[in-house]
Image (cartoon, rainbow, N blue to C red):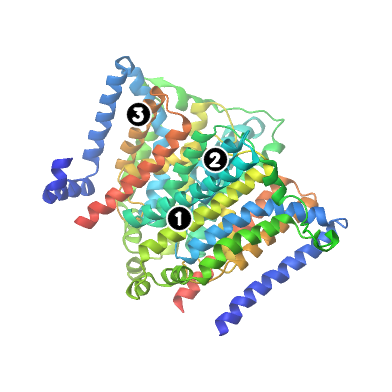
């Protein structure tokens, strides 16, 4: 019970931090409004999707260093296939990319289970493999994206039958994120599979003795992570209109957001909401630094330092937790 | 191979040979690769080619020393390439302003600073070395971009001595051997004969046991990551002399091959096993392999895939072999 309160306390704290940062942004830039919110949501989308994938793997007791590289593969696959494709074909392409993501994640998981090499080494090796695959598919940024995909995440939400003024403030990027999480993670969390993720994360041996197929569950966790990485890669292509073969800075950012979001590195504890909130907190910090006209390179240093500090803090907490 | 797979005893014996003395199969592999290269293009093998291969392999082997030493404790140093780059860039851009010795001193102290930061994260905050060094690499890269704008007008001077070391030849062999041979002897001596070297193996084999026998693990980690950064800095200086341009991504492409070289050389990524001798052969194997891939016109993507798969394959193989014993 106390753990429940503590866990929610963490999330509530993040909500408070987020509100504080929004107010700060409004103070720095008085005309920060709907369009500003929209661009924050759009820039945060790939980070958020990568973080959800990472969070699921971390909950299941692993880590996936290849998340950014898988996003690059998904992004270039989508962009290359979509170039010159009709709207109908683009739907098919999206399905193909998602299947590719699932497959990449499943390959990561299967290699970890079959070779018995620790996850951190396997996914480091696969980071290079997926990077290579992305470069083989597309050597330089290029390709295209269907216009309707871009329309999915740009601008405010408009619902038929509801006056636009009521929903316009809500960025479509946030809605897209919410729908992805609701369609993929919520059913898993509610099913036996979600419980098994938490089980193998907190104690694989105990999970094994209670009849959880540890290997298969681990593969499933990595596959879901791959699926979210593919969604993240697609969102990069959606917002830029091209495929990007060089992985973005999503790896460290997602680890930092997962830790800041209250998921313990080592597994078994935490949820998805916290990490998503943490992504928006980190993005808003970046935005505020930009609005304060801090040099973007200096902002990158500050952001990197914050992430490293967060990860350090998380590691100290994890060590404490293990001792007590 | 099919014969040995059916006879576990032979397989076990080969496995023991690989684990106990990884140098023998590695040298065989190296010569096999050179043999394949000779079949692909007989004209390529010459004394000049050998000297050139050594020249290319030396910075890789030095950078791989960072990975070897940190891997002995079960860590890794992914900031090595970035540290090498800042050392090279800072010394090349400061040299016209304050002179060569002062520039090199400042550049190396930057490297030490990064190493201390890594050491702090790994030793005291207990962050996983992989994540910590990745993070510092990110921060350092940002600092480099900011620094670059202050020196954009000053021009670049590559110190003469570094150019001589990097590109010169004496007696048909590259001058960088003058640095590398003492360096390699020192590292191998340190890891085998000094207390510090043995502590690295002890921590890598069983950190809890090492701690209980009175080893101050955090001090060793601190020193180790600082040392690793100094080695990376020296590599950067040597590489600067070899490439003769100060770019912002000078040694970063060496990051991944340096890990691969250490892994191929038989150093276990989980710590406690391996050594620098194997790493040197590993670096040579990678250099020959790269020549081969260039000859066969494999694109960059294919090369990365191969490096990744090599790391995975070799690690999986070592796990299998040690499990069987």
Sort mark 3 into few (<14), some (14-19) or many (20+) by Cα contacts within 10 Å.
Answer: many
What residue is pinned by disc 3?
Answer: B288
Displayed quadrant of residue A239:
top right
Closest to the observer, A251 or A110: A110
Label 2: which secondary element: helix
Label 3: which secondary element: helix
Residue with the most extreme right position: A30
Q: Quadrant of the C terminus of chain B?
A: bottom left
What residue is pinned by disc 1?
Answer: B223
Number of callouts: 3
Tell me the distance, in whole angstroms, between the alpha carbons under discs 2 and 3. Answer: 32 Å
Residue B224 shown left or right of residue B104 in the figure: left
Q: Quadrant of the N terminus of chain B?
A: top left
What residue is pinned by disc 2?
Answer: A77
Disc 1 vs disc 3: Cβ atoms closer than 8 Å?
Answer: no
Q: Is residue B254 above or below residue B132?
A: above
Label 1: which secondary element: helix
User: Does label 1 or label 3 sit earlier along the sequence?
Assistant: 1
């Amino acid at each position: 019970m106390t753990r429940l309160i503590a866990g929610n306390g963490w999330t509530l704290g993040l909500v408070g931090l987020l509100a504080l940062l929004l107010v700060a942004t409004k103070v720095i830039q008085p005309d920060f409004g709907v369009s500003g919110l929209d661009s924050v949501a759009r820039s945060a989308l790939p980070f958020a999707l990568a973080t959800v994938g990472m969070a699921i793997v971390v909950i299941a007791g692993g880590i996936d260093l290849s998340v950014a590289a898988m996003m690059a593969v998904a992004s270039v696959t989508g962009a290359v296939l979509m170039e010159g494709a009709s709207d109908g074909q683009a739907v098919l392409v999206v399905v193909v990319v998602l299947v590719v993501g699932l497959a990449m994640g499943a390959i990561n998981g299967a290699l970890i289970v079959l070779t018995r090499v620790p996850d951190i080494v396997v996914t480091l090796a696969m980071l290079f493999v997926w990077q290579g695959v992305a470069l083989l598919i597309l050597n330089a940024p290029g390709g295209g994206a269907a216009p309707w995909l871009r329309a999915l995440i740009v601008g405010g939400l408009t619902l038929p039958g509801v006056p636009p003024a009521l929903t316009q403030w809500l960025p479509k990027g946030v809605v897209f994120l919410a729908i992805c999480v609701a369609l993929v993670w919520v059913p898993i969390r509610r099913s036996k599979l979600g419980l098994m993720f938490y089980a193998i994360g907190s104690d694989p041996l105990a999970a094994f003795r209670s009849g959880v197929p540890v290997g298969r569950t681990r593969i499933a966790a990595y596959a879901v992570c791959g699926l979210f990485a593919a969604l993240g890669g697609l969102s990069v292509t959606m917002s830029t209109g091209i495929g990007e073969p060089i992985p973005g800075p999503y790896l460290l950012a997602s680890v930092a957001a997962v830790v800041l979001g209250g998921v313990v590195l080592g597994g078994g504890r935490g949820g998805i909401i916290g990490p998503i909130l943490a992504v928006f907190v980190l993005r808003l910090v970046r935005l505020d630094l930009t609005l304060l006209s801090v040099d973007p390179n200096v902002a990158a240093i500050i952001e990197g330092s914050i992430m490293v500090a967060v990860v350090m803090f998380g590691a100290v907490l994890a060590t404490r937790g293990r001792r007590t | 191979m099919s014969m040995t797979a059916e006879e576990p005893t032979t397989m076990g014996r080969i496995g023991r040979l690989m684990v106990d003395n990884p140098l023998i199969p590695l040298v065989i592999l190296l010569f096999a690769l050179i043999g394949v290269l000779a079949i692909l293009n007989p004209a390529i093998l010459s004394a000049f080619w050998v000297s050139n291969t050594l020249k290319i392999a030396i910075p890789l082997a030095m950078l791989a020393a960072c990975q070897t030493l940190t891997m002995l404790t079960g860590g890794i140093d992914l900031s090595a390439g970035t540290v090498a780059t800042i050392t090279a860039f800072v010394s090349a851009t400061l040299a016209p302003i304050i002179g060569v010795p002062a520039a090199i001193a400042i550049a190396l102290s930057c490297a030490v600073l990064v190493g201390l930061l890594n050491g702090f994260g790994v030793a005291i905050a207990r962050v996983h070395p992989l994540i910590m060094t990745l993070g510092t690499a990110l921060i350092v890269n940002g600092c480099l971009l900011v620094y670059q704008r202050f020196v954009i007008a000053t021009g670049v001077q590559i110190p003469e001595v570094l150019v001589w070391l990097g590109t010169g030849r004496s007696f048909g062999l590259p001058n960088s051997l003058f640095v590398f041979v003492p360096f390699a002897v020192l590292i191998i001596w340190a890891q085998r004969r000094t207390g510090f070297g043995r502590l690295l193996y002890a921590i890598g084999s069983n950190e809890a046991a090492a701690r209980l026998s009175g080893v101050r693990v955090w001090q060793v980690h601190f020193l180790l990551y600082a040392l690793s950064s100094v080695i990376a800095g020296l590599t950067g200086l040597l590489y600067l002399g070899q490439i003769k341009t100060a770019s912002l991504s000078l040694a970063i492409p060496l990051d991944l091959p340096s890990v691969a070289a250490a892994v191929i050389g038989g150093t276990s990524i989980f710590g406690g096993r391996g050594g620098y001798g194997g790493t040197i052969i590993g670096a040579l194997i990678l250099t020959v392999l790269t020549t081969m891939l260039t000859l066969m016109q494999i694109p960059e993507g294919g090369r990365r895939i191969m490096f990744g798969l090599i790391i995975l394959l070799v690690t999986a193989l070592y796990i299998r072999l040690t499990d069987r014993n």
